[in-house]
Amino acid sequence: MPRVYRGQDICPVARTMDIIGQRWTVLILRDLSRGMRRYSELLESLGGIPSNLLSERLKQLEADGIVTRVLYSEHPPRAEYELTEKGKALGPVIKAMYRWGTEWQPREEPAEARSR
């Protein structure tokens, strides 16, 4: 659901967030950019995402021209997902988020590892 506030139409950041700003969407894009293509791979990698939500996000990304769905089996119907050129162009954004998270939100050691 698009966010609505004054000035949104002229702000490219706001328009981008309308597409990638929903929970799980950037992580789906991360996994697709790492070579995962099948629904089952995405579902496993994104432990915790409800199946219906993954399906909804993929459909929305497809509608936005970020992802394409390619059938690899007709009976039963099975599909793989690929980033389009538009989707691949988000790669540097995701890499920048990775670098920022590594530097500014480092992973904490578990308490038991610190007490050794």
Image (tube, rainbow, N blue to C red):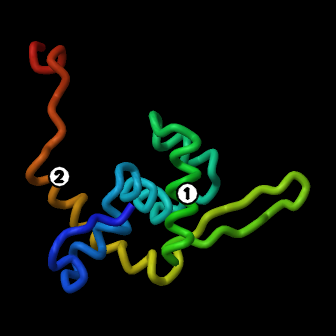
Residue 80, labelled with which disc? none
Q: Residue furthest right?
A: 75
Q: Secondary structure at mark 2?
A: helix
Q: Which residue is mark 2?
A: 102
Q: Position of residue 22 (x, y in %)?
A: 35, 55
Query: Mark 1: few, some, or many residues within 10 Å (few <14, many ≥20)?
Result: some
Q: Position of residue 53 (x, y in %)?
A: 51, 46
Q: Earlier in the sequence, mark 1 or mark 2?
A: 1
Query: Mark 2: few, some, or many residues within 10 Å (few <14, many ≥20)?
Result: few
Quarter of the rendering containing residue 106: top left
**Where does the N terminus fall, quadrant-wise?**
bottom left
Seen from the viewer's position, the closer of residues 6 and 67 is 6
Q: Residue at 21%, 75% (x, y): give it.
A: 13
Q: Residue at 55%, 43% (x, y): give it.
A: 43
Q: Which residue is mark 1?
A: 36
Q: Residue at 23%, 61% (x, y): give it.
A: 97
Quarter of the rendering containing residue 16: bottom left
Kind of residue indicated by mark 1: Met
Q: Secondary structure at mark 1?
A: loop
Kind of residue indicated by mark 2: Thr
Q: Position of residue 9 (x, y in %)?
A: 25, 82
Q: Residue at 17%, 52% (x, y): give it.
A: 102
Quarter of the rendering containing residue 94: bottom left
How far is the residue under mark 1 from the one under mark 2?
22 Å
**Where does the C terminus fall, quadrant-wise?**
top left
Seen from the viewer's position, the closer of residues 76 and 33 is 76
Q: Position of residue 20 (x, y in %)?
A: 35, 64
Q: Is residue 36 left or right of residue 28?
A: right
Labels in figure, total:
2
